[in-house]
Image: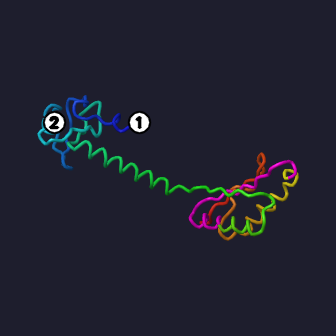
């Protein structure tokens, strides 16, 4: 729903009686024509803030463009706050034949993510029939990673074989 659809401005307002607000003061209940005249005299717009079916709608005398801009800014800030409060999941992909140094690099990346309060999903991906025959190597890799990160996290989802990969989700300790 776009912003224009949810607010009625000036002649779009259908209620005959409106409760008028101007500069954060309630002026009272007025007929729509008088409220429109007051807004026009102030070179501003009459914006329906809270529509009502059985009673006067709440309308505000404001500069509609400025009002709309400020409202969009507030919505964006609310979305930012909402996103930042959610825990994100980062995925680190490995192979079953990973080297010691490469595993240490992945573990240090995972530590950074866990310290910044993000979940980490490790995926050990198998390619081809030869690697699929040695699933135990993949489980050993996951086991080593979990042991090295045991101080920073807890296992949220145990290692599980699914399709051609083993996945395990670790969440930060609180």
- Is residue 154 highlighted in magenta? no
Residue sitting at x 16%, y 39%: 39
Q: Nearer the viewer, residue 133 or 154?
A: 133
Residue beneath disc 1: 1
Which residue is painted at 13% across and 35% down in the image? 37
Q: What colour scheme has been applied to the protein in the rendered image? A: rainbow
Please report contact status of discs 2 and 1: CB closer than 8 Å, yes or no.
no
130, 83: nearer the viewer: 130
Q: Is residue 14 left or right of residue 158?
A: left
Q: Is residue 62 left or right of residue 174?
A: left
Where are the magenta residues, as a range? Answer: 109-130
In the picture, the quarter occupied by the C terminus is: bottom right
Residue annotated with mark 2:
35
Q: Residue 131 appears at what percent x and percent y?
A: 85, 53
Please identify the quarter of the rendering in which residue 67 is found.
Answer: top left
Q: In terms of secondary structure, where does tag 2 sit?
A: helix
Residue lying at 23% horizontally and 39% vertically, measured from the top left:
59
* Alpha-carbon span between mark 2 and mark 1: 27 Å
As displayed, is residue 53 above or below residue 167? above
The image position of residue 145, as x and y in percent, is 74, 65
Residue visible at 25% across and 39% down in the picture: 47
């Amino acid at each position: 729903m776009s912003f224009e659809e949810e607010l009625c401005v000036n002649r779009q307002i259908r209620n005959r009686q409106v409760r008028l607000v101007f500069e954060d003061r309630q002026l009272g209940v007025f007929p729509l024509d008088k409220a429109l005249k007051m807004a026009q005299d102030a070179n501003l717009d009459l914006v329906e803030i809270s529509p009502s079916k059985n009673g006067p709608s709440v309308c505000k005398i404001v500069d509609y463009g400025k009002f709309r801009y400020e409202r969009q800014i507030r919505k964006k800030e609310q979305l930012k706050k909402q996103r930042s409060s959610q825990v994100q999941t980062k995925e680190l992909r490995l192979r079953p034949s990973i080297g010691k140094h490469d595993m240490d690099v992945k573990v240090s990346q995972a530590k950074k993510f866990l310290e910044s309060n993000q979940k980490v999903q490790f995926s050990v991906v198998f390619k081809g029939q030869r690697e699929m025959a040695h699933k135990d190597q993949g489980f050993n890799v996951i086991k080593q990673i979990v042991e090295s990160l045991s101080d920073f996290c807890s296992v949220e989802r145990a290692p599980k074989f699914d399709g051609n990969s083993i996945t395990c989700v670790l969440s930060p300790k609180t």
